[in-house]
Amino acid sequence: MIQELMELSSRFPKGSISHDAFGTVQVSIDCVIDRKGNFKQFIIHENQPTIVERLTSKKGSARLLVDKAEEVLEYVNEKEKSRDKLEKQRKQAPFKHKKFLEKIKDFKDVKDMSPVLLFYNENRESGLIKAQKEFNAIEEKQRQGNIAFLLFDESKRIHEKQTIYDAIIKHYETFLVKEKNDRFERCSICGSLFFPIADIPHGMIRWVPSGQKNGCALVSYNFKASESYNLKGNQNSSICTKCAKAYVEALNWLLTPSSWIPNEKKNKHPRPVFKNRKDISADTAVVFWLRDSLELSDLEQLDEPNEDAIRAMIESIHSGKKSVAKNIVPDKFYAITLSGVAARIAVRDWIEISVDNLQSNLVQWFEDIRIGEYKKETKQIVLSYPRFKNLVLALKKNQEKNSVQHGRVGAILWRCAVQGNSPPLWLLSSLLNRIKAEQGKVTSERIALLKLYLNRKNKQQKGVIYMETHDESNKNTAYICGSIFAVLESIQYHASGGNLNAGIRERFFSSASTTPSTAFGRLMKLTQHHLSKIRGENAGLAINLDKKMQELFCSIEGSQFPSVFSLEEQASFAIGYYHQRQKDFQTKPNNKEN
């Protein structure tokens, strides 16, 4: 996985400096000084990216020439209202500032460092002290962000000069030579003899769902329980500095929003837009990419299904019209399912398949989840493809969107869609329990998931394949019992004139789908009373409903209700019930049932 992330990083456009000793930060304040170290002014501006020395855990907390006000100016916000926070600043600021000055001393022999050394030492009164007074006079909200040094007669910041960059590289490589040990023979990723990474963690990765705001670590050894074989820290992973920087850079690129769009809700922040990421729950996301390109439009159909695009995809696969010729190496698809766990990243899944297989699996996914749903507007049953996010929500209580406990469900369904796997039995059990808990509330998304489970299992065992709409050729007993239950509900509805507080679905769905012989015995007695009432008001309707019920009864093998239904049979019951309901809505356009 890390090797493929490295390859992805190598395709990013590189800046003028791409050495491992450097990183990129934002600067919002320039401290302008002259060549004698005299302070001139502060220039406040919007955040601007700049290449700086990359921090490592072994080299201290200070960065050369660019850092926060605490490090650069020994700044303490004396107006801080919280006494605890103020005391904490007073203790930390001198320590941070001392580290910053120690870093500058390490580079005192570099010619371009002279104005900064004068600012802090020989010319301290008109340099640092004057700057501190001026900084305290600035509006508080403008004191945020990183500070860099700028000579008043130049446009390039001091830390951006080539002599400084060369010195940072030399200093970094000298540091690595000291850190290298006999236990590091070759990098376990690229196989090179380059220097091992010293940072613990290797680098912080931001925008991880449910992770810390300042970033999470993929590889970290900050306590002894993570170590083994007498290896210390990063010796346990044997990764070089180049590989560590590359995979961190790639993950940050995959997880970071590509753009922002306005939020429709009032007083809400803009919403992020991702190209190579899908959030499948509040605490879980998938990042994906192709070996030869960075985008794959087919995956957009999971969340925004377009019937024409899906039909074209299905026809293309079924007719054998592939975009890749046999003599060309097919493109590859990679995907990582991950979650934030405190300061670390939990990798839930890693997928690596060809794009041809991916497209075939997506086609099979859409065929398996395709479901018919009655639309009041057209008074017809319309075939639709439920959205991926709605399928994940189908297992949640009352469809609550803020629950974070079903990231596992999303990860399972993602693998079913992308890799063609069959859902596990526990997912079927959870879904059926949710339907029963909500008194037989069968939605198109829930039926699509039941259909997905049964069809993928039955294809392996050459069993019954469930269609999108009511299938009279399906002689599965549980499926027929579900249809009968829907008819009995319709009979009760007509007998009551639609005035029901709790019908047979709310009272009997759970028992009818698990112990049918017991439940249907009671239901048939109720149904006879309902039919008698309907005959007195509408004899024709009573005859049609009774005929429909008798036809379904005759289809049951042995003409007896089974004692118990298995989990798979309970799923068939729910599908049969849903299909019959949708069929009844279509045959009676004026039906007001919900």
Image (cartoon, grey):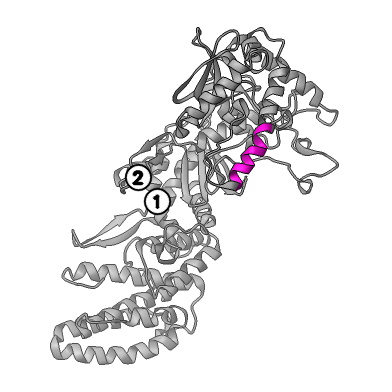
Range shown magenta: 84-94
Predominant secondary structure, magenta span:
helix
Q: CA distance from mark 2 to mark 1?
A: 8 Å
Local packing at callout 1 (Cα closer than 10 Å; few below 14, some 14-19, many 20+) is: many
To which residue does mark 2 refer?
Answer: 310
Helix, strand or loop status at disc 1: helix
Quadrant assignment, res 252: top right
- Near mark 2 (Cα within 10 A), the count class, few <14, some 14-19 or many ≥20, is some
Vertically, is 131 above or below 244? Answer: above
Q: Is residue 11 visible?
A: no
**Residue 495 in view, yes or no:** yes
Q: Quadrant of the N terminus?
A: top right
**Image position, residue 297 (x, y; %):** 40, 37
Q: Kindly identify the residue that appears in the image at 39 percent across and 85 percent down.
A: 559
Left or right placement of residue 240 versus residue 447 in this view: right
Tell me the kind of residue under disc 1.
Phe
Magenta span includes 330: no
Quadrant of residue 72 in the image? Answer: top right
Which disc is residue 366 wearing? 1
